[in-house]
């Protein structure tokens, strides 16, 4: 039987994502519900190493479920990549009697947590918080839905100006290794073409598609470009297209960090609330060194190898649908 847990620490780490606050709130309240004490660790692993830790109660996480960002702040921390750094982190937790840790973040965060667990064997669990939806073992990660809605909203606005001037717009969205945001905002925003890292659409293929639209009297076109696309970034792609087809009046919009901000959607709030509770319940049930996920409406706890072995592949169906509809 696993040792009883008395004090849980919670932190947010890596890239911030809307819905992280809802997850913090859920971890705090579920811990209290199950009669444990709970501590918030500021600035991810950096705050853990620097002992930037405070006790939280149910009221300290009031009025945050609707807020973007993370009240605990996030950071990237190179020291945690060292054994000595992780030892400091462990000593700080030990000194406060914190005997379990919940980390909310992406694959880097889970990698750090896994290394920490292997050295110190403290019960740990990761909650997937990243706008990229690039983690396997869960249908959705916290923040992805909000970010995609933000992009669709921006695409709609850009379409208004594109239509007014018969322009060809290239809209760059986040997704260095994953085209999730791009493919689904592209479908929802009615894009003519979507460039994603998972596919290798060449400039010639893109121009052919745009020309086809031009011949069928399409008055303006929107191309969504995931930032990690193989044909370059949106500026490079727009230049290459303009070189081949100078008659296009091309414009580029890079949405950048606005995709991380904003109030989380209902979907992300509910997802984060569930995952926060499941993380605490998982720890109590003896789960450790796992990432909580929800797949086909079922709670799952995936080990490190399962999460790291592959990325969350885009459904080929989404790619097929986008091609049919962009003629
Ligand atoms: P994300 O969790 O969003 O993928 P990062 O890749 O920046 O974000 O990772 C967040 C933090 O996790 C890093 O700043 C570092 O402290 C920790 N981390 C990442 N990779 C490792 C590793 N190989 N070993 C230990 N800690 C790591």
Image (cartoon, grey):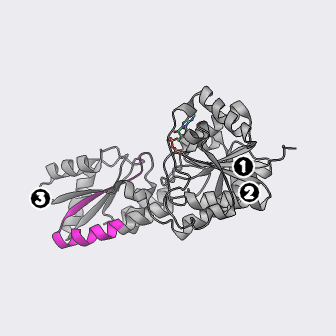
- The answer to whether marks 3 and 2 mark residues whose Cβ atoms lie closer than 8 Å is no
Furthest-right residue in this view:
1
Proximity of marks 1 and 2: CB atoms separated by less than 8 Å: yes
Residue 68 visible in the picture: yes
- The range drawn in magenta is 154-177
Q: Secondary structure at mark 3?
A: loop
- Mark 1 or mark 2, earlier in chain: 1
Query: Quick check: 215 left or right of 181?
Result: left
Question: Mark 3 vs mark 2: which is more N-terminal?
Answer: 2
Residue assigned mark 3? 247
Is ligand 1 less than 8 Å from the beta carbon at label 2? Answer: no
The residue that mark 2 highlights is: 31
Q: Mark 3–mark 1 contact, CB under 8 Å?
A: no
Residue underneath mark 1: 8
Residue at 66% x, 30% y is 87
Task: Residue at 22%, 70% (x, y): give it.
Answer: 161
């Amino acid at each position: 039987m696993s040792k009883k847990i008395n004090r849980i620490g919670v932190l947010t780490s890596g890239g911030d994502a809307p819905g992280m606050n809802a997850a913090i709130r859920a971890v705090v309240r579920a811990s209290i519900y199950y009669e444990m004490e709970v501590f918030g660790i500021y600035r991810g692993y950096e705050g853990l190493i620097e002992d930037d830790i405070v006790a939280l109660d149910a009221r300290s996480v009031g009025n945050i479920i609707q807020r973007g960002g993370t009240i605990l702040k996030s950071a990237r921390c190179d020291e945690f990549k060292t054994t000595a750094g992780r030892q400091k982190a462990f000593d700080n937790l030990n000194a406060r009697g914190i005997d379990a840790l919940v980390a909310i973040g992406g694959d880097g965060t889970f990698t750090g947590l896994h290394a920490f667990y292997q050295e110190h064997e403290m019960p740990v669990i990761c909650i997937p918080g990243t706008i990229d939806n690039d983690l396997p073992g869960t249908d959705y990660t916290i923040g992805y839905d909000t970010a995609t809605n933000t992009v669709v909203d921006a695409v709609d606005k850009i379409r208004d100006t594109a239509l007014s001037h018969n322009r060809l717009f290239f809209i760059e969205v986040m997704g260095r290794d994953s085209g999730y945001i791009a493919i689904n905002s592209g479908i929802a925003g009615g894009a003519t073409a979507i460039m994603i890292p998972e596919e290798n659409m060449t400039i010639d293929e893109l121009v052919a598609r745009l020309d086809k639209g031009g011949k069928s009297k399409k008055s303006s076109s929107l191309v969504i470009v995931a930032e990690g696309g193989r044909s370059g970034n949106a500026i490079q792609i727009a230049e290459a297209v303009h070189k081949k087809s100078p008659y296009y009046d091309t414009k580029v919009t890079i949405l950048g960090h606005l995709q991380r901000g904003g109030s989380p959607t209902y979907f992300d709030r509910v997802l984060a609330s569930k995952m926060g509770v499941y993380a605490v319940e998982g720890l109590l049930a003896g789960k450790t060194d796992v990432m909580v996920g929800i797949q086909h409406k079922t709670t799952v706890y995936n080990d490190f190898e399962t999460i790291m072995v592959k990325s969350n592949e885009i459904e080929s169906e989404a790619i097929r649908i986008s091609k049919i509809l962009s003629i």
